[in-house]
Image (cartoon, rainbow, N blue to C red):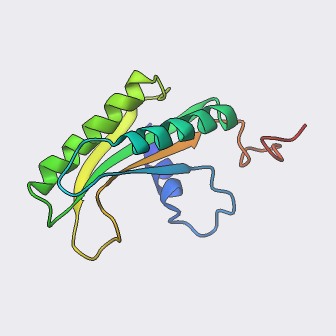
């Protein structure tokens, strides 16, 4: 099972260029500097994404969530963990995850990314999805 999760995580990250079809779905929840509060606009954006994912991909195979902060933020590592917990709470309240969440948190070094104040959500939908054998399109009649 651990090997399967590792391979799925690598697929989410797009590490292997030989895979033409990548079923992973990614979403970032953004935060203001030095804050772990999820803004109303981000909650709304996240809710719309969750509804869209439920419609397109009713089942999940892998669920990974990463809380992030930028190193210049106050208590960056603790802040990254608090951001993670805030988003996990919303996801669980909405019963979005069907499989256990693989949770991580960490700090981006200055200059690594444009906006490291975020929680990164990645899911791999279970079949059917466009990458499954014999599936041409999720929305095909």
- Residue 16 position, x and y percent, is 55, 66
Residue at coordinates 30% horizontally, 73% vertically from top-left? Answer: 112
Vertical comparison of 73 with 61: above or below: below
Residue 16 appears anywhere in the view: yes
Query: Which residue sits furthest front?
Result: 40
The picture quadrant where one finds residue 127 is top right
Residue lying at 42% horizontally and 44% vertically, measured from the top left: 41
Point 25% across, 49% down: residue: 105
x and y, in percent, of residue 37 in the image:
25, 41
Give the quarter of the image for residue 84. Answer: top left
Q: Given the current orientation, which residue lies at the most extreme right position?
A: 141
Q: Position of residue 118 (x, y in %)?
A: 33, 53
Q: Is residue 90 left or right of residue 46?
A: left
Q: Nearer the viewer, residue 123 or 19?
A: 123
Q: Quadrant of the N terminus?
A: top left
Q: Is any part of residue 2 visible from this angle?
A: no
- The spot of residue 89 in percent (x, y) is 32, 29
Q: Residue furthest bottom?
A: 111
């Amino acid at each position: 099972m651990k090997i399967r999760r590792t391979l799925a995580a690598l697929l989410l990250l797009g590490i292997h260029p030989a895979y033409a079809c990548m079923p992973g779905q990614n979403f970032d929840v953004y935060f203001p500097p030095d804050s772990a509060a999820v803004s109303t606009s981000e909650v709304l954006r996240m809710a719309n994404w969750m509804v869209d994912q439920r419609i397109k991909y009713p089942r999940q195979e892998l669920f990974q969530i990463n809380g992030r902060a930028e190193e210049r933020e106050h208590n960056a590592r603790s802040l990254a963990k608090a951001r993670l917990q805030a988003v996990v709470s919303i996801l669980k309240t909405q019963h979005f995850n069907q499989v256990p969440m693989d949770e991580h948190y960490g700090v981006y070094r200055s200059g690594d990314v444009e906006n490291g104040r975020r929680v990164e959500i990645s899911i791999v939908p279970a079949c059917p999805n466009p990458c499954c054998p014999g599936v041409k399109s999720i929305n095909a009649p």
